[in-house]
Image (tube, rainbow, N blue to C red):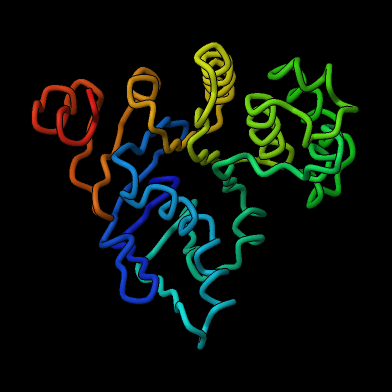
Amino acid sequence: MPLLEVSNLAVRYDKAVILNGVSLTIEEREFVGIVGPNGAGKSTLLRAISGLVRFEERMKRGTAGDISLEGEVRFAGERIDRLPAHEIRMRGLVHCPERRRPFRELSVLENLLAGAYLSRDASSTKRRLERCFALFPRLSERKDQVAGTLSGGEQQMLATARALMFEAKLLAIDEPSLGLAPRIREELFAAIARIHADGVPVLVVEQEVGQVFKMAARNYVLSQGRVIAAGTAAQLMADETLRAGYLGL
């Protein structure tokens, strides 16, 4: 049984179809990449999986700009697409959104502790905090600094670490390298690789196709809201049309 199973997922904003019949699976301990051109629906896919699209649907029901979601999402064998986002998070599916979004007026430490808000186990919170500081030593150095004053790379480290402050059975990361310098990207992806090596399955949406292909066991290529190809990096790279038209390689 897959850890995550997405079946015929469709998302519409008014009459615009953002996702159209998307299906994918992730196995236990797997690293999976989702790549494709801008506007393909990659971020919407993660938001649908983590319950954020359903939240928007409830908020806007009956108003201009209606949102609809169809299809099924199963996590660890349980159907979750009808659950609110916080209950999905409680089950261990962690969504680290694009553009970092720290609590800008809080310190680094306060941001991390906010990620553990749902935890009632102080010893577990302490262990996870120590692990986050080991993964990202720069956050330990800046633990008392206000998050809004961090660099973009440091904010991405903070967002990733905050996502790990409550039990993660799957870490879904949206565009972690967006706007980062090459050296910071390398540091960040090295930390993500260590997270995966520690046994946490990873699903990453990323524009940096070459980096994802180095790390992911399998990849899905999205275009115009559909999965147009899936396979290993070698399989996808062997298709010249796919390379030129959708991967930018």
Q: Nearer the viewer, residue 167 or 46?
A: 46
Q: Which residue is drawn at 84% across and 43% down?
A: 105
Does the rendering let one see residue 109?
yes
Side (left or right) of 199 relative to 144 = left
Residue 84 in picture, x, y percent from top left: 60, 67
Side (left or right) of 152 relative to 69 = right
Q: Residue at x 66, y 60 (%)?
A: 86
Q: Residue at x 52, y 19 (%)?
A: 185
What is the count of numbered marks? 0
Q: Nearer the viewer, residue 73 or 97?
A: 97
Side (left or right) of 214 relative to 194 = left
Side (left or right) of 214 relative to 99 = left
- Which quadrant: the C terminus? top left
Residue 169 in picture, x, y percent from top left: 58, 41
Is 159 above or below relative to 1?
above
Q: Which residue appears farthest toward the top when viewing the image? A: 183
Residue 178 in picture, x, y percent from top left: 50, 32
Residue 89 in picture, x, y percent from top left: 63, 53
Occupied quadrant, residue 87: bottom right
Q: Which of 100 and 31 is in front in this view?
A: 100
Is 63 above or below relative to 17?
below
Does the rendering let one see residue 1?
no
Q: Nearer the viewer, residue 4 or 249?
A: 249
Is 190 above or below relative to 104?
above
Is 134 above or below relative to 98?
above
